[in-house]
Structure formats: C-alpha cells, structure tokens
Amino acid sequence: KNQVEQSPQSLIILEGKNCTLQCNYTVSPFSNLRWYKQDTGRGPVSLTIMTFSENTKSNGRYTATLDADTKQSSLHITASQLSDSASYICVVSRTGGSYIPTFGRGTSLIVHP
Amino acid sequence: EPEVTQTPSHQVTQMGQEVILRCVPISNHLYFYWYRQILGQKVEFLVSFYNNEISEKSEIFDDQFSVERPDGSNFTLKIRSTKLEDSAMYFCASREGQDYGYTFGSGTRLTVV
C-alpha cells in the first residue's frame, strides 16, 4: 500500500535555530517527492520537488534531501524565522497507474521568539 | 504570480442543505482537483478533472458529490444533502500537467450545523 509517514508529528524550536523534518514513503514506482508548506487556514504551497536522480535541492533556507534507495527524504530549515511556523507536508507521486499523489499527515512546526 | 481563487472563504450551512463551492483555476492549467482537509487531519483527495470529465475519484467522492466546469474558467464542487461530517476545509487545486506540482487555492471552510 502506498504510504507516506512523517516525523515528528510536531516540533517546537526557538527562532534562529535549525531543524530537520523527516519523510519515509513506500510509494512505488517512485516518480517525485514534493515538500509543501501549509500556513494555518491556507492551502499548501510548494517548496521543493525532487525526482529519482536528485539528492539535494535548496530553496532559500529550505534544503530537501532524497535517498531513493531507503525511500527517505528530509527537509532542513536553517536559521528559522517566526514565519516558518506552519505544517510541512511531504507528498509523493508514482509513475503509471494513478497520478494522484500520496500525502503525508504533515509536521506541525512552531517557532518561538 | 498566478493564483487559484476559491469562493466563498467560509460557508455555514444546515445539515441536509446543498452547497456549491467555487474555484477559478489558473488559466493555462489543464488538470483540476478537489481535496478536503478535516480539522487536524491530512489532506485527502476527492476528485480529479481533465478534458471536461472526471479522471479519478476517491471513495469519499460518492453520489453526494458532483463537479462541473460550467464555462472556461470556473470549476465547482457541489455537495448535496450535507452531513455534519462534511465539515472541513475544501481545497481546489490545478496543475499544468501530470508531472507538475499543484497550485492550491486558499480553501473554503465549510461548516455544517
């Protein structure tokens, strides 16, 4: 069964600190993995996309990594800001069959001043 | 930057009533979707729409639901005879192609009382 598991479920950090969010998936055959940021009461917004051949991709203070062999991804946030407080959702797509991606439950990040 | 627009932002309706949620996808996008997110839970796929017809739908999308693209710009989700458990955020999304990321709207918060 295609699944996406994220950890931790929630995380509280101080402003300026770094953090890393994890995503493990069983989606197969793999096509791509996206990280989305969802502010409270808003729709998700894409941060990064990674395909099978990519190991690392950055978008400002966000850096995503992908290990397609172990089916793991991480999202690293550097020098966190209060505006980083949000839910971060890992979404994995497969090739062939259904084009509907599998969503993780998200990690709720709270950045305190 | 192009946006997916959803109206209304919040709708309160009585159980058993019909509601129509409206969306204006990005103009050059070809694929349209409805997702929902019950408070505190993950984003769930409802239906995808391409070439003026439903291409995929989930188990959630039963006879109570219908979608329509009445003209070249609007994409609607109709929920007949609403139930309390239909209370959720409903997100419309569109994308240019199957391999592209979603652009989500800001959502409609539906409250059934």
Image (cartoon, helix red, strand yellow):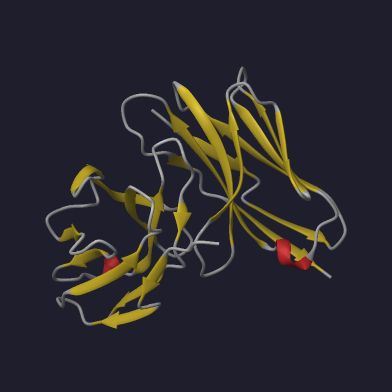
Between B110 and B29, the residue placed more toward the observer is: B29
Measured from the top left, where is residue A93 in percent x and y? 45, 33
Instruction: Inspect this view and state whether residue B42 appears.
Output: no
- Residue situated furthest top in the rendering: A69
Image quadrant in which you'd find residue A24:
top right
Q: Quadrant of the N terminus of chain A?
A: top left
Q: Which residue occupies 44% across, 21% down?
A: A29
Q: Is residue B30 toward the left or the right of residue A43 in the image?
A: left
Q: Which residue occupies 24% across, 63% down?
A: B77
In which quadrant is the C terminus of chain A drawn? Answer: bottom right
Tell me where residue B7 appears, x and y as whole percent: 35, 75
Q: Is residue B70 visible?
A: yes
Image coordinates for residue A82, horizontal then vertical, percent:
77, 67
The answer to whether A47 appears left or right of A42 in the picture is right
Question: In the rendered view, does A15 fall on the left or right side of A91?
Answer: right
Residue B42 point in image, percent of width and height: 46, 53
* Quadrant hosting residue A11: bottom right
